[in-house]
Image (cartoon, rainbow, N blue to C red):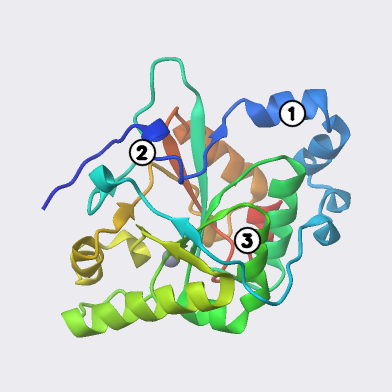
Amino acid sequence: MKISKSFTLLQLPLILVIASISIFAYSLLNKSHRVEAIRRGSKQSIQIASIQQVQSRPQKNIAFNVPTKFASSTFYQAKLKKGEKYIALTFDDGPADHFTDQILSILRQNNIKATFFMIGENIKTYPQQAKNVIANGNVIGNHTWHHWYHHMSPQLAALEIENTANIIYQTTGAKTTYFRPPGGILNNGVVTYARNQKDAIIMWSDDSEDWRRLSASTLVKRVLKQAAPGGIILMHDGGGNRSNTAE
Ligand SMILES: [Zn+2]
């Protein structure tokens, strides 16, 4: 079992990354008032209407494929060239009513792309939000259908991943080889199946623990403390009230 802890980010462009300094620079150059409003937690900054909505028919031929050399590998962070400052934002357990669009709106306002690891049954419930993720230029990853933690037979693991892949494609037109196991569990069967399918297993280096409903200021402190070039930040747009995450 090959487990690589790093990869060269420039060779894996489909994990969309941001310059860690770009938000700040962007705020200075373009939208200082809006970013300041976000920093203060102002509700004025959260304008759902500003996200890109899409037509009901899914776009075609969108493929989020990891380069062949990274197939079946597991990543906790990206290996960057010296001096590069990029960090990846990832949002799990959506799509969700309200919070996905709220987060998309903030990302769009700040010219940030992120990766959303979606749960199949949530795409079934909130297809429009899944489409909005794509329409706003973000990446979708597979996060299984049920988000189960228990051990799974190869057949059950296949259903969990393939049913999710199918609904991602049917809803958004996208195919993805990015997989994140629920709970980060690597040994209950799903990752074995994903690796056999040549998916890349995307873990994280920077856990916001936003599922604990920490305050926005605590989340910011936690994330910044762990932040480093090439880092992968774990947050959630689904699975509960994510108002603190959005704030
Ligand atoms: Zn999850």
Looking at the picture, tell me which residue is in the foreground, 200 or 233. 200
> Are discs 1 and 3 less than 8 Å apart at CB?
no
Q: Residue furthest front?
A: 61
Look at the numbered disc 2 and give the secondary structure of its residue. Answer: loop
Q: Report how far apart the C-alphas of labels 2 and 1 lie in the structure.
A: 24 Å
Residue at 26 percent across and 65 percent down: it is 194
Residue 18 position within the rendered picture, expressed as x and y whole percent measured from the top left: 57, 35
Q: Which residue is mark 2?
A: 77
How many residues crowd around disc 2 within 10 Å: few (fewer than 14), some, or many (20 or more)?
A: many
Q: Which residue is mark 3?
A: 133
> Are discs 2 and 1 less than 8 Å apart at CB?
no
Tell us which disc is closer to us: 1 or 3. 3
Which corner quadrant of the image does residue 141 belong to?
bottom left
Residue at 81 percent across and 35 percent down: it is 36
Number of numbered discs on residues: 3
Q: Report how far apart the C-alphas of labels 2 and 3 lie in the structure.
A: 23 Å
Which amino acid is tagged 2? Gln
Residue at 57 percent across and 29 percent down: it is 20
Q: Decide: is 37 above or below 137.
A: above
Q: Which residue is mark 1?
A: 26
Q: Which badge, 1 or 3, comes first in the chain's sequence?
A: 1
Look at the numbered disc 3 and give the secondary structure of its residue. Answer: helix
Looking at the picture, tell me which residue is in the foreground, 55 or 136. 55
Q: Decide: is 27 above or below 218.
A: above
Q: Is mark 2 within 8 Å of ligand 1?
A: no
Q: Which badge, 2 or 1, comes first in the chain's sequence?
A: 1
Q: Is residue 146 visible?
A: no
